[in-house]
């Protein structure tokens, strides 16, 4: 079982998981070519119906394409690989958007293949920036930077957070620098409010922000909960009433943390009241540009880990990043078998 929460999406794509990685490859490749400038159109050669069907059947059988997805193969064009042409396979979903992948077809029509080129780019650590977010752990020059896209109402994010802290800092100290970015999912009604409140506190106190995040994740199932709801002592509860309680409690928690960390109470209250979510929207836009659709998601010097995975796998990714940076990591820990520790 994979502990992860996703943004709601078209149901057809939930059934096309086998193609998600390949589709991402196609999107990356297309974007790379588009970024290089305008290109002349290359004339295509029609495929015979027999050959087009043979290719479509091969793709369908090898990739186990679901029965309701139609596969159309078209546009035979010269490729940059000797002995091969390029053909386009389009995957058409009823009542949904289509996707396409490029394949290589040998000149003798006997072999179908796929080849992709990935630019290695610069330092993987620079895949995502900190963006002036409050950090925890080491300084800006720490050899490993962990950026976490987090939803404060997500139970799997809470599970991952509690596994990371304080264990991660106890193991690595100032060798790691952790930054949280906001990724509130639309199915969580008070997640944006919580993110705004936490950011109001972050503007005045980095330690206060982290204590607030620790508190929210640690008390997730208590926030907005009324122990007397639906009992003889109370009226029947409603989602609207629970949401109102949650927002009130979050505001109180924020003000309490602010007092503890000597924040300017008037400024903090004004920020809470304004509920300016523009920074949250920018964070969501960044996540979309990075093709992030689930929480929690960790980016460890460029390496992505999605979901509330066993913390030992996070340790391994951090250890690998430290070794790559020329830093000796702590002794390795045994990795649990898939499914254990979750």
Image (spheres, rainbow, N blue to C red):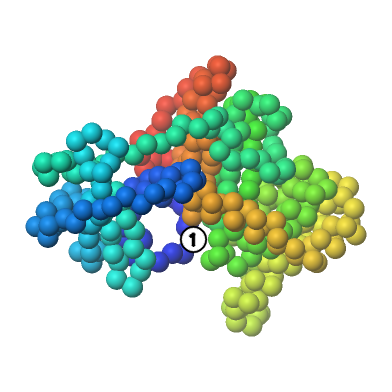
* Image-based side of 26 in relation to 146, left or right: left
- In which quarter of the view is residue 112 placed? top left
**122 shown above or below 103:** above
Q: How many marks?
A: 1
| Residue 164 x/y as whole percent | 57, 39
Relative side of 1 to 120, left or right: left
In front: 33, or 61?
33
The quadrant where residue 135 appears: top right
Judge whether 227 appears above or below 125 on screen.
Answer: below
Q: Residues within 10 Å of mark 1 (few under 14, many from 20)?
A: few
Of residue 103 and residue 44, the one placed in the foreground of this image is: 44
Q: Quadrant of the C terminus?
A: top left
- How far across and down, in percent of the image, does residue 66 sit? 23, 60
Q: Quadrant of residue 269?
A: bottom right
- Is 306 left, or right, of 183 in this rendering? left
The residue depicted at 17 percent of the width and 40 percent of the height is 106
Q: Tell me which residue sits at (64%, 59%) in the image.
A: 281
Q: Is residue 167 visible?
A: no
Question: Residue 264: where, in percent of width, then height?
Answer: 90, 53
> Disc 1 designates what residue?
7
Residue drawn at x 67%, y 47% as measured from the top left: 214
Give x and y (percent) for residue 218. 63, 50
Q: Is residue 196 visible?
A: yes
Q: Is residue 213 left or right of residue 28?
A: right
Could you tell me which secondary element the residue under label 1 belongs to?
loop
């Amino acid at each position: 079982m994979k502990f992860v929460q996703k943004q709601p999406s078209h149901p057809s794509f939930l059934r096309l998981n086998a193609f998600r990685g390949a589709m991402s490859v196609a999107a990356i490749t297309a974007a790379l070519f588009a970024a290089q400038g305008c290109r002349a159109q290359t004339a295509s050669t029609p495929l015979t119906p027999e050959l087009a069907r043979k290719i479509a059947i091969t793709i369908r059988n090898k990739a186990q394409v679901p029965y309701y997805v139609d596969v159309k193969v078209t546009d035979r064009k010269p490729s940059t690989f000797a002995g091969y042409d390029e053909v386009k396979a389009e995957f058409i979903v009823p009542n949904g958007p289509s996707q396409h992948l490029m394949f290589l077809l040998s000149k003798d029509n006997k072999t179908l293949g796929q080849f992709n080129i990935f630019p290695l780019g610069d330092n993987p650590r620079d895949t995502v920036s900190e963006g002036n977010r409050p950090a925890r752990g080491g300084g800006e020059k720490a050899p490993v930077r962990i950026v976490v896209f987090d939803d404060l109402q997500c139970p799997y994010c809470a599970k991952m957070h509690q596994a990371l802290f304080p264990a991660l800092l106890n193991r690595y100290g100032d060798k790691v620098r952790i930054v949280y970015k906001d990724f509130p999912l639309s199915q969580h009604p008070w997640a944006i409010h919580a993110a705004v409140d936490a950011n109001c506190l972050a503007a005045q106190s980095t330690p206060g922000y982290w204590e607030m995040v620790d508190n929210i994740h640690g008390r997730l199932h208590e926030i907005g909960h009324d122990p007397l709801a639906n009992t003889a002592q109370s009226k029947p509860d409603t989602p609207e009433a629970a949401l109102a309680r949650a927002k009130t409690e979050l505001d109180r928690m924020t003000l309490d943390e602010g007092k503890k960390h000597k924040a300017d109470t008037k400024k903090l209250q004004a920020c809470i009241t304004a509920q300016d979510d523009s920074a949250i929207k920018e964070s969501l836009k960044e996540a979309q540009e990075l093709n992030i659709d689930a929480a929690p998601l960790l980016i460890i010097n460029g390496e992505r880990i999605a979901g509330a995975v066993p913390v030992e796998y996070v340790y391994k990714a951090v250890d690998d990043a430290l070794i790559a940076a020329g830093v000796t990591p702590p002794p390795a820990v045994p990795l649990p078998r898939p499914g254990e520790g979750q």
